[in-house]
Amino acid sequence: MNAVVYLSYTGNSRKVAAYLSRLLSFPCLDLHGLKERTFKRLLFVAPVHAERLPDEAITFLREAQAEEMILVATYGRMNHGNALLDVQRKFRLPLVGAAYFPTRHNYLPNDLYESPYERLAPLAKAFGSGRYIIVPESRDTFGRGFFPKLRARFAVHISVGEGCTHCHLCEEACPFEAIVDGRLNRRCIRCLACVKACPNAVLSYRLSPPLARYLSKPKSEEALIYVGSQQ
């Protein structure tokens, strides 16, 4: 089968996947709960967290089989690192296309940025081209591979305030079973799916001073699209 599969915690990657699904006329499938792992053509969309793909995405790509594959990594306009090259090297994926696509940053509540999805249109021509690619190497930031989950726990603090009705919608939204009545456990990667799901805005988060300073830096709006060169 052909499919666009996405992993999305707060909706950014889902929107990108929906656009590509319409462009390719492929079904758009949420990775959560998806059992299928064998495809003819697979386009996979996932967010970048701490300059790498989340463990869920890595596990899926380890198991997925496809004749041709395209990867799209959405990133909050800071640094995407080598998130795609890492998985291509690790699993020898049959890539005919890849992209780093800028979106709004989840940690910036007033960020309304939205890149034109039409910038991704060249990917639609990659399937069937017979031209496989190697994702170019990008610049890494210092300490990228140093315990990203641990860094996230120190950098982003999530708390529950007064007015919690114990509706448990935050628990239902969390893909990692990492929150119970506003209390987090070690599974949490600070994707903020719980904060977004809270109907009473009782869940809140704050950034550590180093992370806040980092996010105050100028953002990149560059969409990097990689497809095989024309012959």
Image (spheres, rainbow, N blue to C red):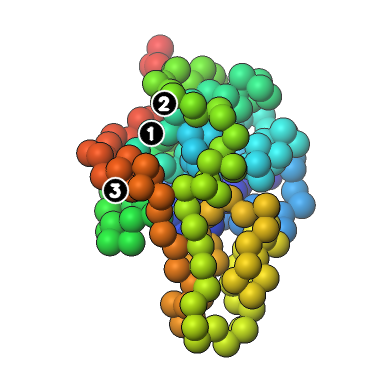
Where residue 164 sits in the image (x, y, percent)?
54, 83
- The residue type indicated by label 2 comes to Thr
The amino acid pointed to by label 1 is Asn
Q: Name the mark nearer the viewer: 3 or 1.
A: 1
Spatial CA span between label 2 and label 3: 24 Å
Labelled pair 1, 2 in contact (Cβ < 8 Å): yes
Is there CB contact under 8 Å for labels 2 and 3? no
Which circle's residue, 2 or 3, is located before the other in the chain?
Answer: 3
Q: Quadrant of residue 78?
A: top left
Q: Is residue 63 left or right of residue 70?
A: right
In the rendered image, residue 230, in percent from the top left (x then y), is placed at 38, 16
When the figure is inspected, residue 197 is found, relative to residue 117, above or below; the finding is below
Looking at the image, which is closer to me, 67 or 139? Answer: 139
- Which residue: 65% across, 41% down? 55
Asked if 102 appears above or below 32 in the picture, the reply is above
Image location (x, y in percent) of residue 156 = 47, 53
Rate crowding at label 2 as few (under 14), some (14 to 19) or many (20 or more) other CA atoms within 10 Å: few
Separation (CA) of disc 3 from disc 1: 16 Å
Q: Mark 2 — residue? A: 141
The residue lying at 49 percent from left, 72 percent from top is: 203
Q: Position of residue 65 (x, y in %)?
A: 72, 34
Who is closer to the viewer here, 106 or 91? 106
Q: Which mark is residue 115?
A: 3
* Residue 131 in sight in this render: no
Rendering quarter of residue 42? top right
Look at label 3 and name its amino acid: Ser
**For mark 1, what is the residue?**
79
Relative vertical location of residue 72 with respect to residue 179 in this rendering, above or below = above
The alpha-carbon separation of the residues under discs 1 and 2 comes to 8 Å
In the image, what residue occupies the spot 45% across and 68% down?
A: 204
